[in-house]
Amino acid sequence: MNAFLQKSLPAAAYFDSAIMEAEWQKLWFKHWLYVGRRSELAETGEYKVIEIGGQQVLLTQNERGELKAYHNTCRHRGSELCSELEGKFSGGRIVCPYHRWAYSLDGALLNIPFVDAQINGQELGLYPVHSQVWSGNMYINLSNTPPPELGQEADPYFSLLDNWPLDQLVVGHRHDYALKCNWKIVWENYLECYHCPGLHPELCELVPLYKETLATDVLDGVSGTKDTVAEGVESWTMDGKAIGPIFPSLTPDEVKAGHVYLSLPPNQWIVGHPDYVRQVSFMPMDAQTTHIASEWLFSEEFLECPDSSPDRAIEFGELVLGQDALACEINQRGMTARPHKVGFLVAPQEDDLGKYHEWYRAAMEHK
């Protein structure tokens, strides 16, 4: 074995349905997951339903303006409460369509029709799901036990985007699509730039480090190039120029860098640029299909200005997304070859993948 090579995850981890089921139980149901912007539930009683590994979760806003999350299941006999993916509860009540058991927006049982008996609304309340809001983003955790603190596994650190007004930004564009690949391939593609010179020539012009097949600064003499945009480049747009005013709360170094990355495994990363923010999230649909959502966030003032346009930022992001989609799907299609049992990682280009695999193995081995 060459010193610069190390084994990747086994090939079966990318297509085996039994491994995917184990991932639901050991990983996806135990970690915080991004599920949308808080502004999606702006009014009392507004709701949305999401599905994660066969589990339906109901998100709503109560009368105090708080985010609440429950399993989409009636306590009577387990009926589905909401069949529509989004809507608004009438009169602040969640009513089961089957036998009309009614619950408050805080999950307490309010009424059992045609039954004259005292009830304990809390004991027979909806099954709660851990939920939290951070910087305008909604997160849930399906663990049956108290979850770890949100952001505990953030890379490089949770406060990285403190100078970005993330909670004040609004979604100016969203792109949803299904990739025919395992969810781990999406992460792996994000974590390395070994593929960048061949697949992302436009991106490499903006970020010189990526021409050297590196995704992060290497300080051991392999590269002296910093992970910043090229001279004269302001942001990730089709012409490298900012689409609007630079966020005034950023430091000079943050502006000069042109981008910072915050990873929140297992399903989100956020890229802060001097003039906008883009965040990508994903959810496995099965072992070989992944739903991707990419959101472009801008200031409300910028979007309302008739002379402003986010198109150059959106067009560039869509270009890179399309290139990555191609890479992920050809990676998946080759995985099932009968002789292919394991791949190999190259150092230093894929060092971050090695760290990600360590995180994955630890999560899967945790009881």
Image: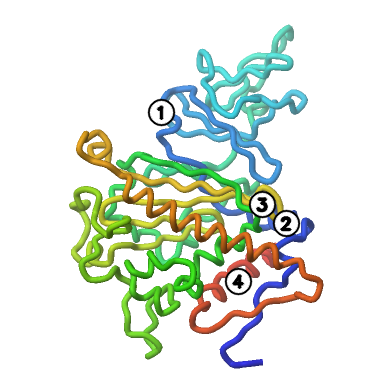
Which kind of residue does numbered mark 2 sit on?
Met
Dot 3 or dot 1: first in sequence order is: 1
Dot 1 or dot 4: first in sequence order is: 1
Q: Is residue 367 left or right of residue 146?
A: right
Q: Which mark is residue 20?
A: 2
Image quarter hosting the N terminus:
bottom right
Q: CA distance from mark 1 to mark 4?
A: 38 Å
Image quarter hosting the C terminus:
bottom right
Dot 2 or dot 1: first in sequence order is: 2
Which kind of residue does numbered mark 1 sit on?
Ala
Write the residue at 33% across / 74% down: 208
Q: Which residue is mark 3?
A: 289
Write the residue at 51% across / 13% down: 91
Q: Is residue 184 above or below residue 6?
A: above
Q: Residues within 10 Å of mark 3 (few under 14, many from 20)?
A: some
Q: Nearer the viewer, mark 2 or mark 1?
A: 2
Write the residue at 63% across / 63% down: 330
Secondary structure state at the residue bearing disc 3: strand
The location of residue 62, given as percent across then percent down, is 47, 26
Q: Residues within 10 Å of mark 4 (few under 14, many from 20)?
A: some
Mark 1 vs 4: CB contact within 8 A: no
Q: CA distance from mark 2 to mark 3?
A: 11 Å
Q: CA distance from mark 3 to mark 4?
A: 20 Å
Q: Which residue is mark 1?
A: 42
The location of residue 21, given as percent across then percent down, is 75, 54
Q: CA distance from mark 2 to mark 4?
A: 15 Å
Which kind of residue does numbered mark 4 sit on?
His
| Quarter of the rendering containing residue 308 | top left
Q: CA distance from mark 2 to mark 1?
A: 35 Å
Q: Nearer the viewer, mark 3 or mark 1?
A: 3
Q: Which residue is mark 4?
A: 357
